[in-house]
Image (cartoon, grey):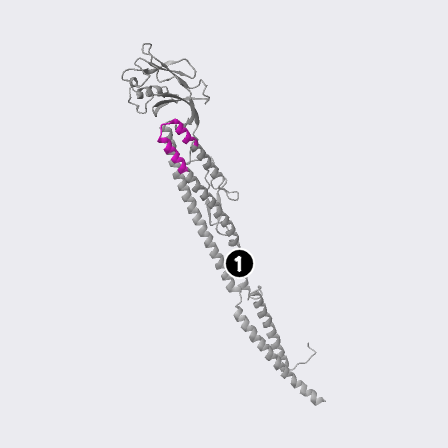
Amino acid sequence: MADITLTAAVRSNLSTLQSTASLIGNTQERLATGMKVNSALDNPNSFFTASSLNARASDLSNLQDDIGQSVSTISAADKGLTTISKLLDDAKAKANQAAQTDDLKERATYEKQFNELRTQIQDIAKDSGYKGKNLLAGEGNDVDVKFNEDGSSNLTVEAVDYTDIGSAEGLSLAALAEGSYNITTVDLKSDKITGSTKLVDVDGFKVGDKVQAAINGGAAADISGAVIAADTTVDDLISDIEALGTGTKASIEDGKLKIYTATSDTDAATTDGIQFSYVPDATDGGTGGNLATAFVASSDIGAWETTEGIDKSLEELTAAISTVRAQASTFGTNLSVVENRQDFTSQMINTLQVGAGKLTLADTNLEGANLAALNTQNQIATSTLGLATQANASVLQLIR
């Protein structure tokens, strides 16, 4: 206060104590907060530069969450493709198995299994989403991954549609339409009979006998060429039967001639399809091996009735497998890019935070040493202030 008179020595020591106290307060604040720059008043340049670095680090940290979710979305699609690839391999195995047999009933079984695998492929594609995004579900499911604050650095992962593989470009696997077949079995009574065996050497067939067919419940009529001659073979009969068309197929299986005829109804009593009959020559009394025995069993088969149908499916499967493998490679590359950018962003955040720390973080060792020195300096200043005031006390003794 202006109306109190202090000696120069006292005032000097008081000023020192005040300065030391201020420095001690600042040092204690740095030690308490760990920051040497706590506000713009401490160091405007360092404070605002550090704030900018921390703000960018915060923005990138927020992007990291989105990048991590994108990684999960791509990973889900990749796992779906891996499973689809295995199912396609299984489907191709079924087609190869069907190609290795002429038994339409077996082909029908493989065809049914193929259709089941095909359905599973579509179901896997539908179930490969993550948090509302499915890269295997086509339009509206593209994933846009942003790598920097303004979005100028990004990656768009394009979705494909494998949820309807009957129409998907590059992954077109037609569903195998099933059809009904009645099976007529003619027992040739010998497992040694082959296609070149002459019919006259087979029990029940005689020269001059005929084979007739009634198509779709119509009147029975002779099959063109199916009049048995001395040199007519089993293969000749099969060719004449298959020449009727309408999905008719015949084969020799374990000494039996099996004739598969298309029908719109699997009921054994139906008149749809083709019913065969045997007309023996009036003079010889042949039986034709009970050729008239029809509709003793039924089987479902469609596209794989012919080898050409199986070959077409194999071509589609080969193309589909190549497409899925190529798409898996694309998703793998995308995943690698996103994961690398994720690691890079983590390192960048660390770099920014370290840089900001260099401008604002306190050296606690240094500040601790400073506090110890200031405390010592404060004690010395307090002692010298006491010495300075002793001079005034001497004057008081003279007055007394």
Residue 67 position in % (x across, y down): 49, 50
Between 173 and 13, the residue placed more toward the observer is 173
Instruction: Name the residue at the right extreme.
Output: 400
Q: Which residue is mark 1?
A: 54
Q: Amino acid at mark 1?
A: Asn
Say if the magenta span includes residue 100. yes
- Left-right relation of 159 to 281: right
Which residues make up the magenta segment? Answer: 88-112
Q: Residues within 10 Å of mark 1 (few under 14, many from 20)?
A: some
Between 102 and 321, the residue placed more toward the observer is 102
Instruction: Please identify the quarter of the rendering in which residue 83 is found.
Output: top left
Residue 200 position in % (x across, y down): 29, 17
Instruction: Please identify the quarter of the rendering in which residue 308 is found.
Output: top left
Residue 120 position in % (x across, y down): 46, 36
Instruction: Name the residue at the left extreme.
Output: 231
Disc 1 secondary structure class = helix
